[in-house]
Amino acid sequence: MNKSMLVGIGFGIAIALGITAIASDGISLFSTQPKYAEVVSVTPVKETIKTPRKECQDVTVTHKKPVKDQHQIAGSILGAVAGGVLGHQFGGGHGKQLATIAGAAAGGYTGHEVQGHLQNSDTYATTEKRCKTVEETSEKILGYDVAYKVGDKPGNVRMDHQPGKQIPLDDKGQLIVTAPVVHAK
């Protein structure tokens, strides 16, 4: 064997090993099949989540004090006495009696109304905690609807991550849709 033949055999073996190594990595020098699908659009698929929570605040509440004299008898009596005394100051003889009776009647009615007004405006205030349930809403992304095309052939797929501008294809032309693993360094 001469030297040039040994060199030729060596080159031949090296080229065969190189082609074998390239083919075993999934890279074919003679393949015309695309390596990537082109991403046309990506639409997030979302879910609305409603979370209830309790919201409380202090509120001032006005209460009416309890009434001891519900029929306003004291006001009626005091008003009648005062009205009678005042009415007695007018007129003479029989007119004095009529003025006293009219004054007592007007005074009784007025005393009754004044006491009722005073009782209604006799109030006190307390602070009470009032609570209600409110809902907070948030959105959770469930995945991504991806429209793509391989050559001129369109397709759709739902992915759990955003694919970017391209989706890799395996050696059979099928999408590889698993998320790429990122290792922390």
Image (spheres, rainbow, N blue to C red):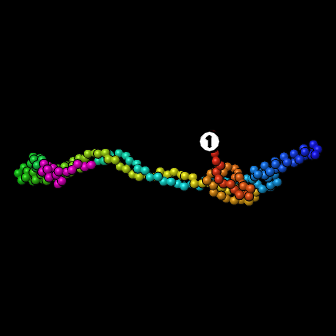
Whether residue 76 is in magenta: the answer is: yes
Q: Amino acid at mark 1?
A: Ala
Taking the view exactly as shown, the residue that stands out farthest to the top is 185
Q: Residue at x 90, y 45 (%)?
A: 6
Expressed as whole percent of the image width and height from the top left, the position of residue 120 reads 24, 50
The C terminus appears in which quarter of the rendering?
top right
Residue 25 visible from this viewpoint? yes
Q: Which residues are magenta?
A: 63-79
Q: Nearer the viewer, residue 166 or 5?
A: 5
Q: Residue at x 63, y 57 (%)?
A: 158
Examine the rendered structure and indicate whether residue 156 appears above or below residue 5.
below
Q: Is residue 170 left or right of residue 85?
A: right
171 sits to left or right of 97:
right
Q: Is residue 99 visible?
A: no
- In depth, the one of 66 and 74 nearer the eye is 66
Residue visible at 13% across and 48% down?
A: 78
What residue appears at the point 21 percent right and 47 percent down from the top-left corner? 118
Q: Residues within 10 Å of mark 1 (few under 14, many from 20)?
A: few
Task: Let me know if residue 78 is in the magenta part.
Answer: yes
**Circle 1: element type:** loop
User: x, y (%) of residue 105?
Assistant: 13, 53
Is 182 or 166 nearer to us in this picture? 182
**Residue 3, image x, y percentages:** 93, 42
In the image, farthest residue toward the right: 2
Find disc 1 in the rendering and name its residue.
184
Percent across and percent down for residue 124 are 26, 45
Apparent side of residue 43 relative to residue 102 in the rendered image (left or right): right
- Counting labels gives 1
Q: Residue furthest front?
A: 1
